[in-house]
């Protein structure tokens, strides 16, 4: 085999797959198609609550286009980080959609499901054996952290995907996975250079984001023995050596080194050349195998229950000394919470975001002293339960509404609340609580693969393979 | 001249939930080289603008991408209570105003 071709169908399942571009790419006879369906960039809520960030119908529409094209061409489809966070609940949510799609398309698929959610007992064991290590910067982690977590996932590398592909799967549905690994797995199995395979994966995993301009389309990659070609397919899409090189910066802490479970992709010596007007030839990337296999952990725990109130302030007297005025309210409010509810600073957290002044950057805002004519105020409180959070918010409602303004004599109403009632209950809110890697005893033990037949008429047959 | 007059893109973004990264990209190699030669963009500047320890700043000059990159620890873990910017995408404005004397 001199070359392997594959398609990145979209930067995120649920963000849209362009049917016409995918059809054009399929004419090039790719050997597989992949896309990731998740990210931590959506925040800790997806992992904590179990609710995906993408709309179900959007994910279904994308999976329909991808599975139909893959089925027609008899090539495997690889989907990673299912349901945004890739825990079991997200994989099951996605698998449900896959069943619907297969029924509607009247097709049968062999699906290899890879689960990446980690059992707390397993993690506690790993921790006690000294197999969990912090990354920088990292929150404190001990056994209690693991026990407090609602869910923890391990980010798989290429190995589980390679094993899943070996089952002859039409669809590999993976829990949390390295985006690049979805693309690197098959080329590396087939003996193509690891550095190139990972580098190409890195370039195409965001779909057409590595192009000069944004637009509907897909990415076609071709890996040969000593170089690879990155080619966008879609109206007016164009990759240049610079856009491909620059893409390695996006959302990455380091533009040259990328840590994966089995080693590090190093593109310091990568070379980028224009192949055609719209495609780019890359070579030179290296992959340094790690001494220890390191699986990154992502965990989320319940932070509490939040209630928010939104309002605006327009009175120039208040705005001219906003910090002093809000400081007075804060002192009054904290005292009231203590007197009425018996709660102190350890029992709840609150924040006042002042949009129009420093709502976006907080204390880092260099222009927070500039004159503004209106400020949006978001008051937010976090407590152990929803009722308490809302009771606390209600105690802030009055002072924000009537706190004295020295320039005025008589009763004043000082904030324009947006809603009635002003408070909005946000429900449970979560926080990420791990930035760590675990060194498992074996490369297999953290990821469980299950083969499932999904199809219009067929009863599901399940066979455990690992 | 202000950096936003010279760069084709100045952006900030999460690099995972615990780090924030800044990219400053150029379309003209000559402009990139001038900005690089000015030595105005460096780890000290980032530490100053974003009030963080200079040892926590990772700063890169990426010649093949005509870009500068800096990565710092997030002040608030992404999405935690009080974090004002879930995606970290609106933290770049102070960089735009940086004066580059060439």
Image (cartoon, rainbow, N blue to C red):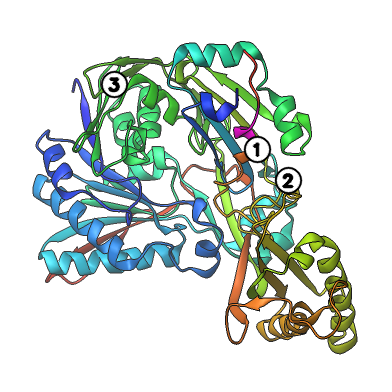
Magenta region, residue range: B94-98
Which of the marked residues, 3 or 2, is nearer the chain's N terminus?
Answer: 3
A82 relative to A212, above or below: below
The secondary structure type at the circle numbered 3 is strand
Assess disc 2: are there few (<14), some (14-19) or many (≥20) residues with their C-alpha within 10 Å of its C-alpha.
some
The secondary structure type at the circle numbered 2 is helix
A325 relative to B63, above or below: below
Q: How many marks?
A: 3
Front-lying residue, A149 or A129: A149
Viewed as shown, does residue A270 lie left or right of B76? left
Residue A95 within the magenta-colored segment of the rendering: no
Q: CA distance from mark 3 to mark 2?
A: 40 Å
Q: Nearest to the eye among marks 3 and 2: give it.
A: 2
Residue for badge 1:
B94
Q: Position of residue A277 (x, y in %)?
A: 22, 20
Are the residues tagged 1 and 3 within 8 Å (C-beta)? no
Q: Position of residue A402 (x, y in %)?
A: 78, 82
Residue A280 marker: 3
- The residue sitting at 71% across, 73% down in the picture is A381
Please report, as a chain letter, where disc 3 is located.
A
Q: CA distance from mark 1 to mark 3?
A: 34 Å
The secondary structure type at the circle numbered 1 is helix
Are the residues tagged 2 and 1 within 8 Å (C-beta)? yes
Asked where in the image residue A101 lies, by quadrant, the reply is: bottom left
Residue A364 marker: 2
Viewed as shown, does residue A283 lie left or right of A455? right
């Amino acid at each position: 085999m001199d070359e392997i071709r594959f398609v990145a169908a979209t930067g995120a399942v649920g963000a849209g797959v362009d049917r016409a571009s995918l059809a054009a790419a399929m004419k090039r006879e790719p050997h597989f198609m992949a896309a990731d369906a998740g990210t931590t960039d959506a925040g800790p809520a997806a992992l904590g609550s179990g609710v995906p960030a993408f709309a179900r119908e959007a994910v279904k529409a994308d999976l329909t286009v991808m599975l139909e094209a893959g089925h027609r061409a008899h090539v495997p489809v690889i989907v990673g980080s299912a349901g945004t966070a890739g825990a079991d609940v997200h994989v099951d949510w996605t698998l449900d959609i896959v069943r619907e799609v297969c029924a509607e398309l009247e097709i049968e698929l062999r699906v290899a499901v890879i689960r990446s959610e980690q059992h707390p007992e397993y993690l506690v064991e790993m921790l006690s054996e000294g197999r969990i290590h912090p990354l920088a910067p990292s929150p404190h982690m001990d056994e209690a952290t693991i026990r407090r977590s609602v869910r923890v996932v391990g980010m798989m590398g290429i190995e589980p995907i390679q094993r899943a592909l070996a089952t002859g799967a039409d669809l590999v549905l993976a829990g949390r996975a390295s985006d690049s690994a979805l693309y690197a797995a098959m080329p590396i199995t087939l003996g193509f250079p690891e550095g190139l395979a990972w580098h190409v994966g890195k370039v195409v995993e965001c779909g057409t984001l590595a192009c000069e301009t944004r637009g509907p389309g897909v990415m076609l990659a071709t890996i040969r023995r000593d170089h690879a070609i990155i080619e966008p397919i879609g109206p007016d899409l164009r990759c240049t050596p610079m856009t491909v090189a620059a893409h390695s910066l996006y959302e990455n802490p380091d533009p040259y080194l990328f840590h994966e479970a089995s080693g590090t992709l190093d593109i310091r010596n990568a070379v980028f050349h224009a192949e055609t007007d719209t495609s780019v030839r890359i070579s030179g990337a290296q992959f340094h195998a790690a001494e220890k296999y390191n699986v990154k952990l992502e965990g989320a725990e319940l932070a509490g229950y939040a209630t928010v109130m939104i309002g605006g302030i327009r009175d120039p007297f208040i705005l001219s000394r906003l910090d002093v005025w809000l400081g007075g309210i804060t002192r009054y409010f904290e005292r009231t919470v203590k007197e009425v509810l018996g709660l102190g600073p350890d029992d709840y957290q609150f924040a006042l975001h002042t949009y129009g002044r420093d709502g976006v950057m907080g204390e880092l805002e260099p222009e927070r002293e500039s004159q503004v004519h209106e400020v949006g105020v978001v008051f937010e409180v976090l407590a152990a339960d929803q009722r308490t959070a809302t009771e606390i918010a209600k105690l802030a409602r009055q002072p924000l509404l009537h706190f004295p303004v020295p320039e005025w004599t008589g009763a004043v109403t000082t904030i324009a609340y947006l809603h009635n009632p002003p408070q909005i209950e946000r429900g449970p809110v979560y926080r990420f609580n791990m930035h760590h890697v675990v060194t498992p005893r074996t490369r297999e033990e953290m990821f469980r693969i299950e083969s499932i037949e999904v199809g219009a008429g067929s009863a599901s047959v399940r066979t455990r393979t690992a | 001249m202000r950096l936003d007059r010279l760069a084709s893109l100045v952006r900030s973004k999460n690099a995972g939930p615990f780090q924030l990264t800044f990219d400053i990209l150029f379309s003209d190699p000559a402009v990139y080289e001038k900005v690089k030669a000015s030595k105005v963009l460096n780890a000290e500047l980032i530490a100053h603008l974003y009030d963080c320890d200079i040892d926590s700043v990772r700063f890169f000059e990426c010649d093949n991408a005509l870009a500068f990159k800096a990565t710092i620890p997030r002040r608030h873990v992404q999405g935690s209570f009080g974090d004002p910017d879930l995606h970290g995408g609106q933290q770049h404005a102070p960089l735009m105003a940086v004066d580059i004397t060439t």
